[in-house]
Image: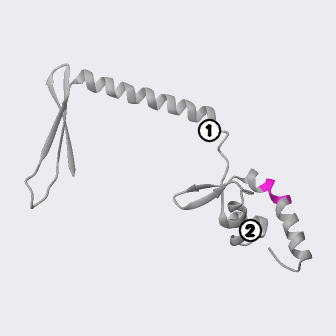
Amino acid sequence: MQSIWFVGMRKPDALLLTKISGNNNFKNNMCMQIINIEAETFEAMLSTVENFTRRMEHLCRRHGDRDSIEWMDNQDVCQLLNISPRTLQTLRDNGTLAYTQISHKTYYKPDDVKKILPVVEEKRKQAKYKGKRI
């Protein structure tokens, strides 16, 4: 699907925005859709988008400092806790360690990782007592 936008002036105070879109398929005839928007409607749409942008920027400034932490990935956490990737998986699976997954990549908040340090140390002591390693 191709889209082409044309902007033109019909009258001094009227903006004409035209979108022509179509599907260039050699087997089928080309279908086109033309959308005309008058200046008043376009300005109203633009104003709505600008208001939304201002609100989002305000929210980001207001809440941005709270989440400006560096997230840790699997490798970072394994190195910090001195555990294997499989042990890390177990900590996720049983709910011991909170995580966020974005595009098949797992991230952890440093505060959450620090909270489970005592848990990992206790498991390490238990494993050592049994002659195993975690």
- Residue 70, magenta (yes or no): no
Residue at (45%, 32%) from the top-left corner? Answer: 53
SS at mark 1? Answer: loop
- Residue in front for this viewpoint, 49 or 89: 89
Residue annotated with mark 2: 79
Q: Is residue 63 above or below residue 30?
A: above
Around disc 1, counting alpha carbons within 10 Å, would you say few (fewer than 14), some (14 to 19), or many (20 or more)?
few
Which residue carries the number 1 mark? 64
Q: Which residue is outermost to the front? A: 94
**Disc 2 residue crowd, few under 14, some 14–19, many 20+, Cα 10 Å:** few
Cα distance between the residues tagged 2 and 1: 28 Å
- Residue 70, how many percent across, how many down? 66, 52
Three-letter amino acid code of the residue under disc 2:
Gln
- Residue furthest to the left in view is 29
Would residue 48 be found to the left or right of residue 37 on screen?
right
Q: Closest to the observer: 104 or 61?
A: 104
The circle drawn on residue 112 is: none
Q: Is residue 110 above or below residue 74?
A: above
Chief secondary structure of the magenta span? helix
Residue at the image position 37 percent from the left and 25 percent from the top: 47
**Looking at the image, residue 23 lies above or below residue 48:** below
Q: Which of the pair 60/118 is nearer the observer?
A: 118
Magenta-highlighted residues: 114-118
Give the residue drawn at x 76%, y 64%: 80
Residue furthest bottom in the image: 131
